[in-house]
Image (spheres, rainbow, N blue to C red):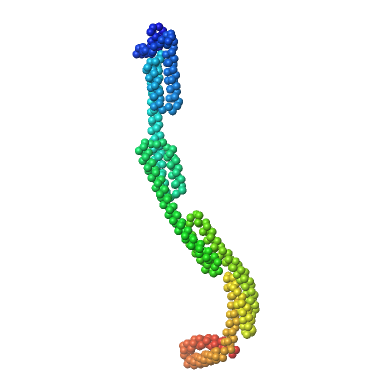
Amino acid sequence: MSSDPWGRVDETGTVYVRTADGEQVVGSWQAGSPEEALAYFERKYEGLVVEIGLLEKRVKTTDLSAKDAQAAIDHIREQVDAHHAVGDLAALRTRLDKLVETVEARREERKQQRAKQSDEARHAKEALVVEAEQLAQSDQWRAAGERLRSLVDTWKGLPRLDRKSDDELWHRFSHARSAFSKRRKAHFASLDAQREDARKAKERLVAEAEALSGSTDWGPTAARYRELMTEWKAAGRAQREHEDDLWNRFRGAQDVFFAARSSVFAERDAEQSENLKLKEELAEEAEKILPVTDLKAARAAFRSVNERWEAIGHVPRDARPKVEGRMHAVERAIQEAEESEWRRTNPEARARAEGLTGQLQAAVDKLRGQIEQARAQGNNARADKLERELEGRQALLDQALKGLQEFGG
C-alpha cells in the first residue's frame, strides 16, 4: 500500500484521491508499483493545472468569446469532477469558478460595450438619415450627390442595429437618396430640354449671322448683328458639345462682316481725310473773295470754287460743320452784297422810298406849323402834345432818309 497527501493506492491496486467529501476512486492500477500509479495520476493532475493555466491566459489576453471560454471550462470541469487525477481538485474547482466569474464579467463588459456601440451606431445612423433627408431637398446637385455617396460609405462602416431599427432607418436613408436622385434626374431632364431649345434657337441665329456675313449694307447689318447678339445671350446655353461649335460659327460670321466693313471704312476714312484737305483749300480760296468789291467778279469766283467743291466727295462727319461753315459764311456775305445792290438799283423800291420820305417830310412840316400856331395862341398844352407827335414822325423820317441814301439819292 502506498499514499501521499492527496491520494493513496490500496492492496488491490485501487487508486483514491482525497477530497472534502471523502476519498473518491480515481481508477485501478495493475501494471506496476503503487508509486508508479500515484505518479501517473499526479501527472494527470498536472496536466489539468497546465490546461487551466492556459485557459486563464487565453481569457485574459485574447478575444476568446464567452461561449467558447465557457465550453472549455465545462470540458475541464468534467475531467475534474470525474476524479481521474490525484491532487488538490478543490483548488482546481476554485480556479475554474473564478475563471467563470471572469468570463461572466467579460461577457457583461462586452454586452455593455456592444450596447454602447449599438447606441452610438443608432445615433450615427439617425444623424446620417437626418442629413440625407436635408440633402434630398438640395439644389447643389454635384456637392449633394457626392456627400450622399460619402454617407453611404459611412453607413456601411457602422455596426448593424437590431433588424427592425436598422431596416427602418435604412428605409428612410434610402428614400432620401431616391428622392434626391429623382429630383436631380427631373432637373437635368428639364435642363436638357432647355439646352435643346437653346441649341435650336442658336442654330437659327447662326444661320442668319452666316447669311448676313457678306452684306455691304453696313449700318442696318451692324445693327442686326447687335440684335442677334442680344438674342444669343437671351437664348441660354446649349449642350456643351454644341455650344462651342455654334459660338465659333456665330462669331466667325460676325468677324467676316465686321472685317469687311472695317476695311471699307478704313478706305473711306482715308478718302474722306484727303477730301477734307481739298475742301479746306477751297474754303481758303473762297475766303479770299471777301470783302466783296466787285459783285459780278465775286459771284463768278464763288461759282468756280463751289463747282469744284461739289465735285469732291464726303469729309469726316466731325469735321464737316467747320469746313462747310466757312463756305456758308462766304456765300452769305455775297448774298448780302447782292441784296444791298438790288435795293440800291431797284426803281420801284426807290420810288416807294422817295414817296414815303416825301409824305413824312410833309407831315413833319405841317406839325411844325401847327406847333408855332399853338404857341402863338398861348395853347402850350396842344403845342407840347404836337411836339411829342413830331418826335415820332421825325424819327420815321430820319430812318426813311437813311434808306434812301442806300439808293444813292
Front residue (pair 397, 13): 13
Measuring 42% from the left and 10% from the top, which residue is drawn there?
Answer: 31
The correct choice, above or below, for 235 with respect to 80 in the image is below
The correct choice, above or below, for 231 with respect to 164 in the image is below
Measuring 52% from the left and 67% from the top, which residue is drawn there?
Answer: 221
The correct choice, above or below, for 178 with respect to 223 in the image is above
Front residue (pair 229, 185): 185
Q: In which quarter of the image is the N terminus?
A: top left
The x, y position of residue 38, in whole percent, is 42, 11
Q: Is residue 354 visible?
A: no
Q: Quadrant of the C terminus?
A: bottom right
Front residue (pair 258, 64): 64
Residue farthest front in this picture: 31
The x, y position of residue 106, in whole percent, is 40, 27
- What count of labels does the image hold? 0
The x, y position of residue 317, in whole percent, is 57, 71
Measuring 61% from the left and 71% from the top, which residue is drawn there?
Answer: 272
Q: Can residue 158 be seen in this view?
A: yes
Front residue (pair 74, 393): 74
Measuring 37% from the left and 42% from the top, which residue is drawn there?
Answer: 171
The x, y position of residue 129, in whole percent, is 39, 42
On the rendered structure, is 242 left or right of 289?
left
Quadrant of the rendered image containing residue 95: top left
